[in-house]
Amino acid sequence: MIKPHDVEFHLPADIDYRYGETNYFLFYIPEERLMAQIYTVSRKAIGVMAVDVLILGCLTESRGEYLYNDVQQHLPVPEKLSDYTTPNGLHVQVTKAPRDYRVDYVGFDNTEIHFDFTGLMEPFDIHDPDHSPKAAKDKSAQVAGSGMGEAYGGHFDLTGQVKGALKLRGKEYNIDCVATMDHSWGARPEVGLHPMGWMNAHFGPDLAIHWINTWDPDQPIGSQQALAHGYVLEDGKVYGLTDIKLRSTRMGSLNTAMEVIATDIRGREFHLHGQAEVGAPWVAYVCAISSVQEFRWTLPNGRIGYGMVMDNLPLKDTNLRRGRRWTDTQPSVD
């Protein structure tokens, strides 16, 4: 179970330079085809924090087509995570632990983000068997089944209402959506991250589905992804997922369409069809090929929702599969 103090740093006695603690917030403005995310990684042992503010307005494989990107890798780490300000203009404050947050960002090029995140549930602890049917009691089994290895040694997901305003190069937009944030802590080496996905579909405050999945690109299409942890939030109650079936269509690094069947502890199935509307490659870590996409989800009854589809594929794995060099079959140059 997540307690109010879990919004703060978790600092083990054997902490070293690999240990990381994250905050991740995002929002969508579907009618404008806009999405934005704010991601921080704190490495307390060496006193640095990475801050990444990203705004997207199209579906692209080029980072040069971002609308806005303020990513700074070596900012000083704050004293606490419940209320911190960064040199590049980000302020995050927990207004009611552990569910509610205020996020403000004043950047460059007349761009600002201001919103309140109000939790619609208690934080979902992936290692608590009362929350996740996939939770394990043994620490090594928890790491193996987390979906992100030791990086998810501690992890919670939280779906909430996001309300506020975006000013993008002087033009103002209203923010009013349901989205999911998360907070992770554990050993997070940059080489050795796991192939995985972090995904959700929000149909309003009364219905949302969120999951973390493993990903093995060597398996056949339709069998590559499997459930690590997840939940259904329906009418204010949370039901852990017991199974998920995913089938993805990809364009390069982007996940552009998905068919999903999610089953919760009640035995209830949710059938989702999703298509990417906004997205791009994302360099959260230079050793990985990640992508983030805002998906438009449809239920069989025609109800429309929106959510994040995030994939992470370490370059180490990609290099093993696709790395090559020049051979003597190449034309010679005299």
Image: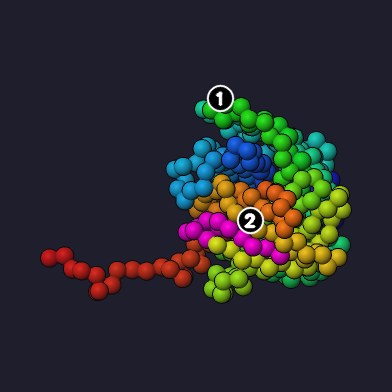
Residue most extreme to the left: 334
Q: Quadrant of the C terminus?
A: bottom left
Residue 293: x %, y % from top left: 58, 50
Up-down relation of residue 37 to residue 131 (above or below): above
Query: How many other residues sit within 10 Å of disc 2, few (<14), some (14-19) or many (≥20)?
Result: many
How many marks the image carries: the answer is: 2
Residue positioned 63% across, 68% down in the render = 225
Magenta segment's dominant SS is strand
- Using the rendered image of the protein, determine whether residue 280 is visible from the camera's viewpoint: yes
Q: Amino acid at mark 1?
A: Gly
Q: Residue at x 52, y 37 (%)?
A: 68
Task: Give how far across and how far down residue 46 sits, in percent.
Answer: 61, 48
**Between tags 1 and 2, which lies in front?**
2
SS for tag 1? loop
Span colored in magenta: 250-261
Q: Residue at x 28, y 72 (%)?
A: 327
* Element at label 2: strand
The residue beneath circle 1 is 170
* Image coordinates for residue 230, horizontal then vertical, percent: 75, 60
Examine the rendered structure and indicate whether residue 52 appears above or below residue 330: above
Could you tell me if residue 183 is visible in this image? Answer: no
According to the image, label 2 marks what residue?
Answer: 274
